[in-house]
Image (cartoon, grey):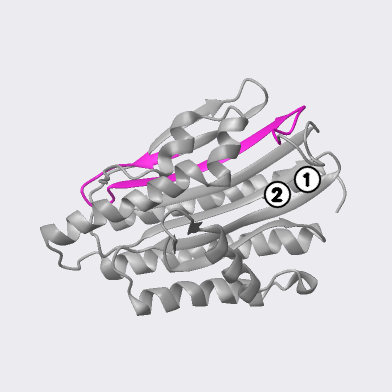
Amino acid sequence: MGALKDEQKKAVKTYLLGLQDRLVAEFESIDGQGLKFEKKSWPRPEGGGGTMTVLRSQVVEKGGVNFSEVYGEKYPALEGEHAGKPFFATGVSTICHMTNPYAPIGHMNVRLLEVGDTVWFGGGADMTPCFPNEEDTKAFHAELKAACDSNPVGGTVSYDKFAKWCDEYFYIPHRKSVRGVGGIFYDYLQGNFDELFAFMRAVGDAYAKAYPAILRRQLSAKYTEADREKLLFWRGRYAEYNLVYDRGTKFGLMTNGNIEAIFVSLPPMVKW
């Protein structure tokens, strides 16, 4: 895959903004209180910017769906073949923390990067339930597997490989445990642009279908104060991972991204 063409960048941006709008609409519908996401656009002085959206309520305790498109003269890698080269990066990232402890934390990110003359896709989706539900886990993984199976990209895309990668990526070394029930994770996918862009769309669409459906199933689940207390401590692991290990957090900070947007993934309330 050579350098990105303007029409390719435009097509990706159109899809990502549409995905952002769809997820916002889903979460507002699930919330069911007539509340709207707060929407903020932010400029990046070095090049580009983005739009963050966040909802805080009694049902969706904190939900965020962010779009970014940033570029510059020096890719913020400290070392390696990409360090210091011109770059372009765009993507959508979403997180949802529900008040009900039986509704799982959900996260998804899809992105496209160009550094020098190298172009690649990355992303994934995963769930972090406080109280795992086998039906929810199977449904979530089934949608992600279908997205992978229907877009093999010449054998580059593999559900089994990406599911394993997800478990390894979201492993918390100091806790000696995975973060949740997994999903898929992938990075540095290179090849035919049209095929990889189709896979990006399949992942985003699978998440937009599977995760809201799970939230709707668990929305009215009965819970106790003890359940809620357990959730707040469970969220601590989520916060620890995002602050210590997450690549997206590090990339956002290294590119002088919007701080509020970068940390929208952190839980609104947490205990240790």
Query: Left or right: 196 with respect to 169?
Result: right
For label 1, the crowd category at 10 Å Cα-Cα, with few meaning under 14, some 14 to 19 and many 20 or more, is: few
Question: Is residue 61 at all visible to an observer of this figure?
Answer: yes
Assign the N terminus to one quadrant of the image: bottom right
Is residue 73 in the magenta section? yes
Is residue 242 in the magenta section? no
Query: Left or right: 158 with respect to 144?
Result: right
SS for callout 2: helix
Q: Position of residue 22 (x, y in %)?
A: 47, 54
Q: Is residue 258 above or below residue 130?
A: above
Looking at the image, which is closer to me, 134 or 179? Answer: 179
Q: Residue at x 44, y 37 (%)?
A: 263
Looking at the image, which is closer to me, 164 or 186? Answer: 164
SS for callout 1: helix
- Magenta part of the protein: which range? 53-77
Q: Position of residue 198 (x, y in %)?
A: 69, 63
> Is the residue under label 1 in contact with that under label 2 (CB below 8 Å)?
yes
> How many marks are shown on the rendered structure?
2
Q: Position of residue 60 (x, y in %)?
A: 28, 51
Quickly name the residue at label 2.
11
Q: Amino acid at mark 2?
A: Ala
Quickly name the residue at label 1.
7
Q: Quadrant of residue 151?
A: bottom right
Q: Amino acid at mark 1?
A: Glu
Q: Position of residue 199 (x, y in %)?
A: 67, 64
